[in-house]
Amino acid sequence: MDDTYISVSEMAKLHGLSRQSLIHYDNIGLFKPRKTNEKGYRFYSKHQIPYLREICFLRSMGVGLDAIVTHFQERCPAKEIQLLHQQKQVINSQIAKLVKVREYLNQRVEIYEEAIDGEETQMHEPFIRSMHSRQALFTKWIQPINKENLHVTLMSLWQKLFAAEMIASAGIGSIIRLKAIKGKDWFEGAGSCIFLPRQELCEINGVIQIPSGDYACMYKYGMPYDVAYLEELMKWICDNGYELCGDIIDACLLDTTFYNRKNGVDFCMLQAPIRK
């Protein structure tokens, strides 16, 4: 064979590709060998190297094979500029998505860091924390109120969030209504919520605003319908000269998937908005 030709293996090695990649390029009509001998072996001309080099460049930029095949049928500088601009838009979209995913990850990490800090403090010891305003997707609990129906209620919200192409990265919880607390029917109108990721605009039905302000907080192991923890926090609020001024949030920090021990309940933080 003339030394101006090289084998599939040599051409692949020269470009950091596998033999299978070059054979695939041949099969889809993207980059065909110059010669094939009687035994079916493929050979490329060294003059084809710049073409494969350009294909490798476009692939390294993330351009799909179908687009490259079409592009090489009528390739010119103007059309290559157009192709690269299109790929740039794809990359910008991917970057925006990754930035959002990174923020989702940060928010979930914050929840777990809060849980670690909380588990190292004394349980049921209330404290005051200033909190930013938040949004949450809310729906009333399915009756009767039990662990199984809490799961089902939460998943009805999860489906709404998923349909809106949002991720439940900011945590889940329950909301106990102020009116019900004052009326001593603790769980009238209560329900589950998914906290919406920061800086996300949401037009889903059921989104409520959780105001900023000072909150009396308390860590606990327990389900949101355990009245004892709510009574304990309310007693502390009253004893310390505060007044409950809004709905109580029961934010889940660690759910039961983290535990293989007997308690089988969530680790949560009660958050009660207060004023003097």
Image (cartoon, rainbow, N blue to C red):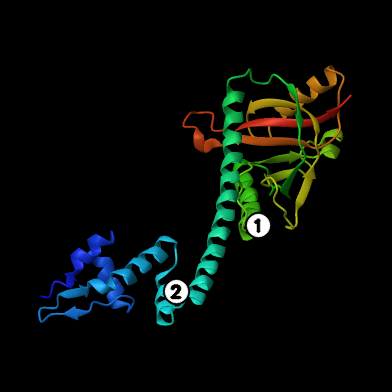
Determine whether, in the image, residue 194 is placed left or right of residue 72: right
Q: Is residue 208 above or below residue 260?
A: below
Q: Is mark 2 on a helix, strand or loop?
A: helix
Q: In which quarter of the image is residue 23?
A: bottom left
**Circle on res. 264:** none
Q: Which residue is drawn at 32% across and 77% down?
A: 28
Say which of 86 and 189 sits in front.
86
Percent of width and height locating residue 220: 64, 26
216 sits to left or right of 266: right
Q: Which amino acid does label 1 sit on?
A: Lys
- Coordinates of residue 207 in the picture (x, y in percent): 75, 51
Q: In this view, does 256 lie to the left or right of 269?
A: left
Question: What amino acid is labelled 2 in the image?
Answer: Ala
| Residue 79 screen position, x and y as percent | 50, 76
Mark whose residue sits in front, 1 or 2: 2
| Quadrant of the image containing the N terminus | bottom left
* Residue hosting label 1: 160
Residue 76 drawn at (x, y percent) = 46, 78
Question: Which quadrant holds residue 235?
Answer: top right
Give the total number of marks visible in the rendering: 2
Q: Can residue 259 be seen in this view?
A: yes
Q: In which quarter of the image is residue 10?
A: bottom left
Query: Local crowd at mark 1 within 10 Å, few (<14), some, or many (≥20)?
Result: some
The residue under label 2 is 67
Question: Could you tell me which secondary element the residue under label 1 belongs to?
Answer: helix
Question: Which residue: 19% across, 80% down?
Answer: 35
What residue sits 28% from the left and 59% below the top? 16
User: Which residue appears at 50% of the width and 34% of the height?
Assistant: 258
